[in-house]
Image (cartoon, rainbow, N blue to C red):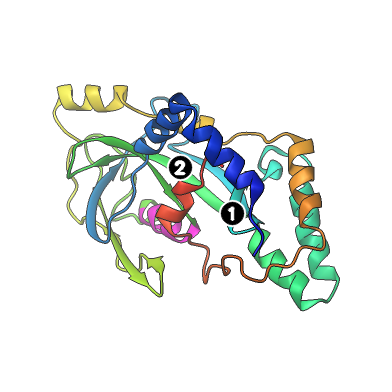
Amino acid sequence: MAINLEALRQKHEQLNNPAVANQNSDFLKKFYQIPEGSNAIRILPWRDEDKEFYAETKIHRVPQGDTVKNVHCRKIHGELCPLCDLYFGLWKTGKSEDEDLARKIKPRARYYMNILDRDSGDVRILSVGVILFKKFIGTMLDEDFGDITDLEKGHDFKIVKVMEDGWPKYDQSQPRPKSSPLGTKAEVASIMDSLHEVHDLVKLEEYEEVKKAADMLVGVSVEGTTPSEPSEEVSDGDYLSKLQS
């Protein structure tokens, strides 16, 4: 198996640059990594009405040897995306190996939002796929719950994470039936002052960089790379470990 020189260069740079390593560590600490089992959180509203409480993006997971590089889809910004062009082109060849690669680089929805971890009391960024996000939205559209982010009459959400064949399942997740205030006035003020800039996470990738990533995949065998996910969800730890790559 060939050595991934680019991955080694990145690791070498990280090891020789403590400032970069610390920056990456601090960045990942902002995220809520969902533990297995039952976890109580409160989804937080945004600080004003100009933006939604969540930020939406789509991610191409690009195989690079034994690693995976996450690339934000440019179409989320209304721009041309070479990886999307490659994705659709691969399906037209009729070759099974091209279809396998297409499944791997399929743009997958990802949503970022601020949450309060009820266990620690910390404000963290929750990054989820479409399945869990649908549960949040479905709850808000249910007249029995409404806006669960409301500071006074909102609802905590119980995320139940069960690992199955190495992948997370959230089928048992549900809102708490009883509404409750987020906290005291002082606590609410502190929590809202601690919101992370989730909308800034949806970056516009440079066209040439995305094209380069797409061009490198043409004719590439996907044998031995990470298997495709069985659903739209991605293992949380795996996703966050590669979020900055």
Q: Main secondary structure of the magenta part?
A: helix
Q: Position of residue 82 (x, y in %)?
A: 79, 48
Q: Nearer the viewer, residue 136 or 7?
A: 7
Q: Is residue 131 magenta?
A: yes
Q: Which residue is at 65% across, 44% downward?
A: 6
Please name which of the two marks, 2 or 1, marks the residue nearer to the observer. Answer: 1
Crowd around label 2: few <14 · some 14–19 · many ≥20 (10 Å) = many
- Disc 1 secondary structure class: strand
Q: Is residue 78 above or below residue 18?
A: below
Locate the N terminus and report the quarter of the image it occupies.
bottom right
Q: Is residue 86 visible?
A: yes
- Compare marks 2 and 1 and give the one earlier in the sequence: 1
Residue 36 in the image: above or below residue 122: below
- Residue 72 can be seen in this image: no
Q: Residue at x 29, y 52 (%)?
A: 145
Q: Position of residue 181 (x, y in %)?
A: 18, 37
Q: Residue furthest left?
A: 184
Mark 2 lies on residue? 112
User: On the image, which quarter does residue 21 sit in?
Assistant: top left
Find the distance from the CA under tag 2 to the CA under tag 1: 20 Å
Q: Write down the residue under mark 1.
A: 68
Amino acid type for the residue under numbered disc 2: Tyr
Query: As drawn, is 208 to the left or to the right of 17?
Result: right
Badge 1 crowding class, 10 Å Cα cut-off, few under 14, some 14 to 19, many 20 or more, is some
Note whether 185 is above or below 140 in the view shown.
Answer: above
Query: Is residue 100 rendered magenta in the image?
Result: no
Magenta range: 130-139
Count of labels in the image:
2
Residue 152 in percent (x, y) is at 21, 35
Rendered image quadrant of residue 88: bottom right
Q: Measured along the vertical axis of the image, is residue 242 above or below residue 13? A: below
Question: Which quadrant is home to the C terminus?
Answer: top right
